[in-house]
Image: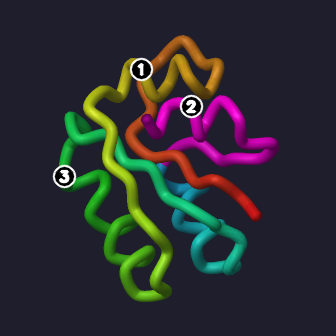
């Protein structure tokens, strides 16, 4: 599952703003989006990733994604950095 990818990643950014910034800089290897996140929040990130052909993986839970990142709150998006 994608949670393991986050756990194994050496470098990643959490959250929509930081993810969009990393996508624009061309540093993202893979994007992980929580399916239960508000679509209004994730739409910009997904759109940006699609434009530059970054693979997008979906996970079921913001809470689990946040936990995989080592934070106590949910994460809507996580970008795995090159």
User: Label 3, label 2: how many angstroms apart (C-alpha)?
Assistant: 24 Å
- Residue 8 drawn above or below residue 80: above
Residues shaded magenta: 1-15
Q: Which residue is mark 1?
A: 64
Residue at 25% x, 39% y is 37
Q: Does 6 lie within the magenta span?
A: yes
Q: Nearer the viewer, mark 1 or mark 2?
A: 2
In the image, taking residue 54 as reference, residue 29 lies left or right, namely: right
Residue at 41% x, 20% y is 64
Label 1: which secondary element = helix
Label 2: which secondary element = helix
Residue 2: x %, y % from top left: 46, 39
Q: Earlier in the sequence, mark 3 or mark 1?
A: 3
Instruction: Spot the residue most to the right.
Output: 10
Label 2: how many Cα within 10 Å (few below 14, some 14–19, many 20+): few
User: Coloured how?
Assistant: rainbow
Which quarter of the figure is the C terminus placed in? bottom right
Instruction: Spot the residue most to the front.
Output: 1
Q: Nearer the viewer, mark 3 or mark 1?
A: 1
Figure quadrant of residue 68: top right
Residue 28: x %, y % from top left: 64, 67
Q: Which residue is mark 3?
A: 39
> Label for residue 81?
none
In the image, taking residue 28 as reference, residue 55 lies left or right, namely: left
* Residue sitting nearer the eye, 66 or 38: 66
């Amino acid at each position: 599952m994608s949670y393991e990818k986050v756990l194994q990643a050496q470098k990643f950014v959490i959250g929509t703003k930081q993810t969009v910034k990393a996508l624009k800089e061309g540093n993202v290897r893979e994007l992980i989006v929580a399916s239960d996140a508000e679509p209004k929040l994730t739409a910009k990130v997904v759109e940006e990733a699609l434009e530059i052909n970054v693979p997008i993986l979906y996970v079921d839970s913001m809470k689990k994604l946040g936990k995989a990142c080592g934070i106590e709150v949910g994460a809507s998006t996580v970008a795995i950095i090159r």
